Image: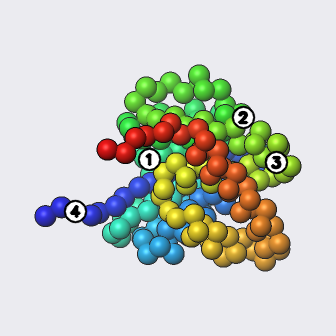
């Protein structure tokens, strides 16, 4: 009998202030809303802003034994130190999502993974707000992986962000959509069989 068991884990990493924890929190919350088992584990470096920040997200159709990930299916790498630290750990045939505004593609020394470069900082600046680079990354990653539904991400914004930030939700949605559109434009067309 075929198993419909689903298991996917990822690490999101960058420096403090890049919003990496918000990306992970939104993915985890959306997956939970969709009825899956989830763990979300944030870790901070010495200081939050400017130090390192990363989080792990595990999404599964069954109960999850541990939130600790050593060999993730995917890495969202927002800066070079996070790529150097976690890139080698990504599973073969996994995905390395690269913030190509800050990381040169040649820094990836892996032939056995898919590398998906998105210039999230440049896109955020072009669209008038550099602070939304993380939401552009989120939109691009969700469009690429289809890990959760986009509308679930939109519904999760007001739960994940505190009330002070609720007035920015429309801007967050717009930034997520910029990431989605970027991915649609730059994903090679695949013919249906």
Relative placement, left or right, of 190 versus 133 is left
Disc nearer the start of the sequence (4/1): 4
Relative height, residue 123 to residue 158 (above, below):
above
Give me the C-alpha separation between circle 2 and circle 1: 23 Å
User: Of discs 2 and 1, which sits in the foreground?
Assistant: 2
Packing grade of label 3 (10 A; few <14, some 14-19, many >=20) is some
Residue 143 visible, this angle:
yes
- Classify residue 150 by image quadrant: bottom right
- First in residue order: circle 2 vs circle 4: 4
Instruction: For label 1, count other residues whose C-alpha is less than 10 Å away and answer few (under 14), some (14-19) or many (20+).
Output: many
Q: What numbered label is drawn on residue 72? A: 1
Question: Comparing marks 4 and 3, which lies closer to the viewer?
Answer: 3
SS at circle 1: loop
Across and down, in percent, residue 66 comes to 41, 62
Residue at x 77%, y 67% (from the top left corner)? 170
Residue 16 circle label: none
The Cα–Cα distance between marks 1 and 3, rounded to whole angstroms, is: 31 Å
The label on residue 127 is: 3
Left or right, 149 with respect to 138, comes to: left
């Amino acid at each position: 009998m075929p198993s419909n068991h689903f298991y996917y884990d990822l690490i999101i990493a960058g420096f403090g202030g890049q919003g990496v924890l918000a990306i992970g929190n939104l993915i985890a919350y959306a997956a939970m809303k969709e009825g899956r088992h989830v763990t979300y584990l944030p870790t901070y470096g010495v200081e939050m802003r400017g130090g390192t920040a990363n989080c792990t997200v595990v999404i599964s159709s069954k109960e999850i034994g541990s939130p600790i990930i050593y060999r993730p299916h995917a890495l969202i790498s927002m800066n070079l130190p996070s790529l150097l630290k976690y890139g080698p750990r990504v599973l073969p045939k996994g995905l390395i999502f690269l913030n190509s505004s800050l990381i040169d593609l040649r820094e990836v020394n892996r032939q056995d993974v898919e590398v998906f470069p998105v210039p999230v900082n440049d896109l955020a600046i072009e669209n008038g707000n550099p602070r939304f680079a993380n939401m552009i990354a989120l939109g691009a990653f969700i469009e690429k992986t289809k890990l959760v539904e986009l509308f679930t991400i939109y519904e999760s914004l007001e739960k994940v962000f505190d009330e002070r930030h609720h007035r920015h939700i429309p801007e967050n949605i717009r930034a997520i959509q910029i990431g989605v559109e970027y991915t649609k434009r730059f994903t090679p067309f695949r013919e249906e069989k």
